[in-house]
Image (cartoon, rainbow, N blue to C red):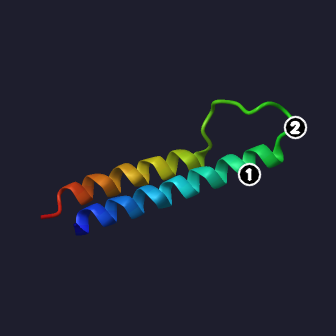
Amino acid sequence: MKKVLITALLLLSANLVLANEFLNKVNQQDQPQTAMLSEAELAAQEELSAALSANAELP
């Protein structure tokens, strides 16, 4: 149960970071949105992957 809660919170946190980055891009650009990820988005995805891997190793 503890693992599930930690995983859910990590996913929620990562999604909030990615949503914030997306909204910042939309607000700052006059051009249509591109499919490229920012450095912050890539870092958030890497951090999430590392956290989920560490969480999977918990007893």
The crowd level at tag 1 (other Cα within 10 Å; few <14, some 14-19, many 20+) is: few
Q: CA distance from mark 2 to mark 1?
A: 12 Å
| Residue 38 position (above or below residue 3) | above
Q: Which residue is mark 1?
A: 24
Q: Amino acid at mark 2?
A: Asp
Displayed quadrant of residue 3:
bottom left
Of residue 21 and residue 5, the one placed in the foreground of this image is 5
How far across and down, in percent of the image, does residue 56 sit? Answer: 21, 55
- Name the residue rendered at 65%, 51% in the picture: 21
Q: Which residue is mark 2?
A: 30
How far across and down, in percent of the image, does residue 35 sit? Answer: 64, 30
The crowd level at tag 2 (other Cα within 10 Å; few <14, some 14-19, many 20+) is: few
- Name the residue rendered at 52%, 45% in the picture: 42
Assign the N terminus to one quadrant of the image. bottom left
How far across and down, in percent of the image, does residue 52 sit? Answer: 31, 54
Residue 54 relative to residue 33: left or right: left
Point out the tag, 2 or 1, that comes first from the N-terminus: 1
Residue 38 relative to residue 57: left or right: right
Assign the C terminus to one quadrant of the image. bottom left
